[in-house]
Image (cartoon, helix red, strand yellow):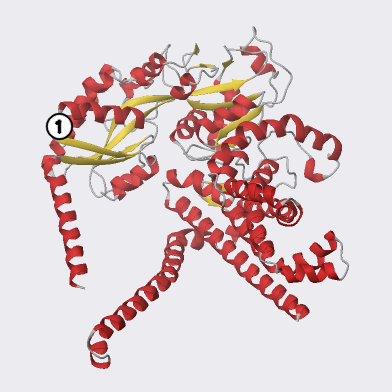
Amino acid sequence: MPATQTTAPPGPADKRISGDLIFRLVTTVFAFSILIILALMLAEMTSESLPAIRQFGRKFLTSSEWDAVQGNFGALPYLYGSVISSVLALALATPLSIGAAIFITEICPKKVGTWIAPLVELLAAIPSVIYGLWGVLVMAPWLQSTVQPFLIEHFGFLPFFQGAPYGVSMLAAVFILMIMVVPIITSITREVLLTVPLSQKEAAIALGATHWETIRMAVLPYGRSGILGAAILGLGRAVGETMAVTMVIGNSPQISLSLMSPAYTMPSVIANEFAEATSKLHSAALMEIGLILLLVTLVINALARLLIWSVTRSAGGGAA
Amino acid sequence: MFALRKSILTVAVLAALALAGNASAETLINGAGATFPYPLYSKWFAEYAKIDKSVKFNYQSIGSGGGIKQITAQTVDFGASDKFLSDEELKAAPGKLLHLPTVMGAVVVTYNVPGVGKGLKLSPETLAQIYEGKITSWSDPKLMHDNAGLKLPNKPIIVVHRSDGSGTTSIFTDYLTAVSPEWAKKVGKGTSVKWPVGLGGKGNEGVAGQIKTTPYTIGYVELAYAFENKLPYASLKNSAGSFVEPSIASTTAAARGAAKSMPADFRISLVNQPGKDAYPIVGFTWLLVYQDQKDKAKGKKLVDFLKWELHQGQKMADKLLYAPLPANVAKMVEKTVLSIR
């Protein structure tokens, strides 16, 4: 306060400057508070998981033993389940979403597009427990009676489709995650494609490009970084998804190549066991899984940044 | 600036007044813990509020583990748990912590075998071996032996268990530990264990949903949940050698049988108790209260409530599908309640 009083002229101007200063201070505090919260979270989680880190060290990441009674903890099956389920879901969801977004923005009549787009966004707003309930009551029995027997019978020679059809399985988790991720990727990709300048498309058409060639040469390359970003956001949602996955994955900490067998993910084991974890080591081990989950998410985000960065640079160079 | 400051001040004063007003009106007793008895406890608190208007209960059903942590840290006035504390956990508490049994719960074995309706019978060895992954077919001779009248199909058994840590799992694994040395050695008991086989469902509803939608499954849920949802349940062979159906009466019978060997601190597992009518997978749920109350006035209110709960409260239990304490045990608990100062 004294500083502004000495430098600024008196009167209304004084009030304006002090207002600016307060605004600047407040926004600075807000901006840093996010970083501080993240730092505090990291610090707290690390200190809470110290007993497990001390006890198991690096073995925590490579052991598949998880026994709360004996006090032996290893996170590998959970790490495996999280990574495989999200990556497979993303691999299925991305082409589907890009196709849907292209249809909405480029192919279907505008009137229809304005109807479909909000409906897709509505799908993204459905709470995950609803997806989970639908998954366990409708999708899993359907998988068990129809899809899984078919896969086992016709593709059972592959290690991915061996075993008994239980319904709840890695496959169910991949499907439910795919369904949850599609609306997010679709709606963001649609926004990205809408920003493609008309002149770019017109130029392609002027060169004699067909509709498909216009989309391939003018629309998609322009939106490439945005589409990648959308996919990464989808991956982020898939990795952190807890409720819906817990309900359909079968919650069995094992590493199996087969998509038919039940599995387990990192958020699921935290949600399942934390409330009743009374021993210090057990809650520390769960805390360490949380820490690993946080680090995995950070790594995914960092990779996404790098990817988008490199893609935009090369694309920018090409355009220029 | 002045206007802003003034309005902030007004808000602060109003907030302070509101808080103070609340605090002076009634005694607030905070509790936290087990989810299993929550429906009954909230009924008790609502009924008790009609009798003594000067006291208000606030119970958060955050799970037994949370309840133990909160009462040990003294952030609540009482805790609640479906499992009793170990000696080590008791030592970590800053004062003498009492275990007060309130009601009992039973765990029911439920199944879905097409062609077999009600009436499956299981002996302890068979159940343990199913969960150990040793008996894998519904037509196993051991199962056929106990179920001569039923047509058991030659299909693999799909085992379902709880994936979330829970008191139900604790009681169920306690039972398997008691009846099978093999289970005791390899798995043991706890709120979450390392299951040799099976699928994990989240909560009673997850296990029940899994069983309803998948044929040839077997699993376990709380008695109240099985009854409300009309799930088929198995009769279990108890330690006296008779097959007993789960019910409120057979649950209470288990505690009656245990009364003779009841330790003074009530830290006892009720599985596989003697008695012809005793259902074998039964457990107490406890309130955790410090014997020395810091706030004497509040402590007195709490004791008043506990006495009421042991008399009038018990009568409300069976309607909500909880098994009331047998009279001889309730008397023992009341003695302990009166020792609270």
Residue B199 visible in the current orientation: no
Name the residue at 29% across, 48% down: B72
Quarter assignment of residue B135: top right
For label 1, the SS is: loop
Quarter assignment of residue B117: top right
Question: Horizontally, is A271 left or right of A124 in the view?
Answer: left
Which chain letter matches label 1? Answer: B
Toward the bottom, the furthest residue is A7
Coordinates of residue B113 in the picture (x, y in percent): 65, 19
Question: Horizontally, is A297 left or right of B226 in the view?
Answer: right
Name the residue at 30% across, 18% down: B326
Q: Which residue is mark 1?
A: B53
Name the residue at 69% across, 62% down: A193
Rendered-image quadrant of the N terminus of chain A: bottom left
Q: Nearer the viewer, residue B161 or A213?
A: A213
Toward the top, the furthest residue is B149
Question: Horizontally, is B256 left or right of A151 in the view?
Answer: left
Q: Nearer the viewer, residue A304 or B267?
A: A304
Coordinates of residue A301 in the picture (x, y in percent): 60, 66
Quarter assignment of residue A263: top right
Coordinates of residue B110 in the picture (x, y in percent): 55, 22
Rendered-image quadrant of the C terminus of chain A: bottom right
Residue A233 visible in the current orientation: yes
Count the numbered circles shown.
1
Question: Horizontally, is A222 left or right of B149 in the view?
Answer: right
Residue type, numbered disc 1: Lys
Circle 1 packing at 10 Å, graded few (<14), some (14-19), many (20+), is few
Q: Nearer the viewer, residue B162 or B195?
A: B162
Coordinates of residue B150 in the picture (x, y in percent): 65, 10
